[in-house]
Amino acid sequence: MRVLSGIQPSGPFHWGNYFGAIRQYVELQDQAAEAYYFIANLHALNTVRDRDLLRQYTLNGAIDLLALGLNPEKAVLFVQSDVPEVSELCWLLLTGTPMGLLERCVSYKDKIAKGLKADAGLFTYPVLQAADILAYDSNVVPVGEDQIQHIEVCRDIAGSFNHHFGETFVMPKAKVLDASAKVPGLDGEKMSKSYNNTLAVFDDVKAQRKQIMRITTDSRPMEEPKNHEGDVLFDLYKLVATESQIADMGALYARGGFGYGEVKKALADAAEAFYATARERRADWAARPDDVRDVLKAGAAKARAKAAATLARAQAACGAKGY
Ligand code: ADP
Ligand code: TRP
């Protein structure tokens, strides 16, 4: 099994990123023969148009991944733009990609539906993602639910290239964790940087506690038992609390006679404990940014070697090499 995934450095990573994607990266680095993970800074360039911010988010993204358990001895960690072969492969894939396939992609469609202007970068975003995946002959792509469509597009593109030019690319498959495929945000909608409803993984502990205490809840009388299904506080608590804490909280909801303040405090406590080790690891890496850059440089060298071989194969297959 060869695993690959990318994450955009378009802001600080949030609980949805961790439970939907990053947690799987860490689990899979032990199971896969090879694992490639990268910071998708070229994708982020669609939304982050400030060079200093993009640089800062890119390095911080790598630090966050290392803090959350990515081990550079087991996984290849790199920055997308350090592998220019992928952008070249993207061009080969763009030729032959039907407009209709991209017009159906949600990120583009949503923007147009809101009456906003989209640029060519957003429109062709799934093709760059396909190049990311195909360049490393990946067969498993761990992602959150919202990325499934992009993996399907990648399969379509790979399939039609293979059909037209002969077997060139490995067919990838998305891997989604059911339980946390969609982490709710503070407003109950999907947690997302674009909705301003996130809990950052590495926020200051006190600031995060305040944010949790401000989550809006219904004005249920305190005596009434409450069904915890679909309750945002309970759903978030389930992610960071221990089995026995979850069982106790479930019983409290069923019994009633509690205030949401109590639940919020328990949630903030559980979150603090859950991320404590990662927070310590983060402080350690953040104090050594040059070591992080070295990890990324070594990762890029390995990634480039693999991507160059795939690019050469694709160029030969379509006649862009060997005239
Ligand atoms: P955002 O929506 O905040 O911009 P990204 O699109 O950068 O997040 O997502 C990075 C990864 O995290 C993807 O694999 C995505 O599926 C996953 N992810 C993002 N938000 C959530 C969520 N609320 N629940 C589960 N997974 C998520
Ligand atoms: N589009 C992905 C996201 O927003 C990031 C990404 C870029 C990616 N290239 C990828 C994910 C390749 C998986 C595989 O989350």
Image (cartoon, rainbow, N blue to C red):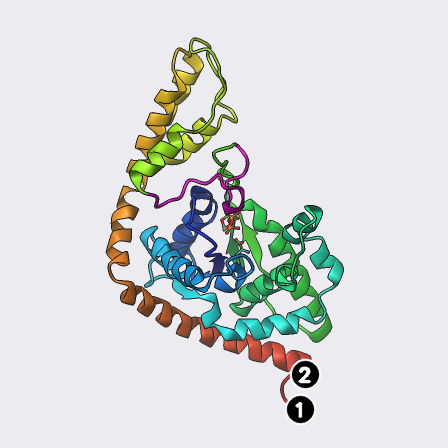
**Based on the displayed image, in which of its 4 quarters is residue 265 positioned?**
top left
Instruction: Indicate the secondary structure of the residue bearing disc 1.
Output: loop
Asked whether disc 1 touches disc 2, contact meaning CB atoms under 8 Å apart, the reply is yes
Real-space CA distance between mark 1 and mark 2, rounded to the nearest whole angstrom = 7 Å
**What's the amino acid at mark 1?**
Tyr
194 is within the stretch colored magenta: yes
Q: Residue at x 35, y 61 (%)?
A: 74
User: x%, y% of residue 26?
Assistant: 39, 52
User: x%, y% of residue 216?
Assistant: 47, 26
Q: Residues within 10 Å of mark 2 (few under 14, many from 20)?
A: few
Residue topped by disc 1: 323
Camera-side residue: 253 or 176?
253
Left or right: residue 239 versus residue 123 is left
- Of helix, strand and loop, which mostly describes the magenta segment? loop
User: x%, y% of residue 323?
Assistant: 66, 91
Q: Residue at x 63, y 89 (%)?
A: 322
Q: Is there any visible trace of residue 192 in the rendered image? A: yes
126 is within the stretch colored magenta: no
Camera-side residue: 92 or 319?
92
Residue topped by disc 2: 319
What's the mark number on residue 311? none
**What's the amino acid at mark 2?**
Gly
Vertical arrangement, residue 233 with respect to residue 26, above or below:
above
Camera-side residue: 1 or 23?
23
Number of callouts: 2
The residue range painted magenta reads 188-203
User: x%, y% of residue 57?
Assistant: 41, 57
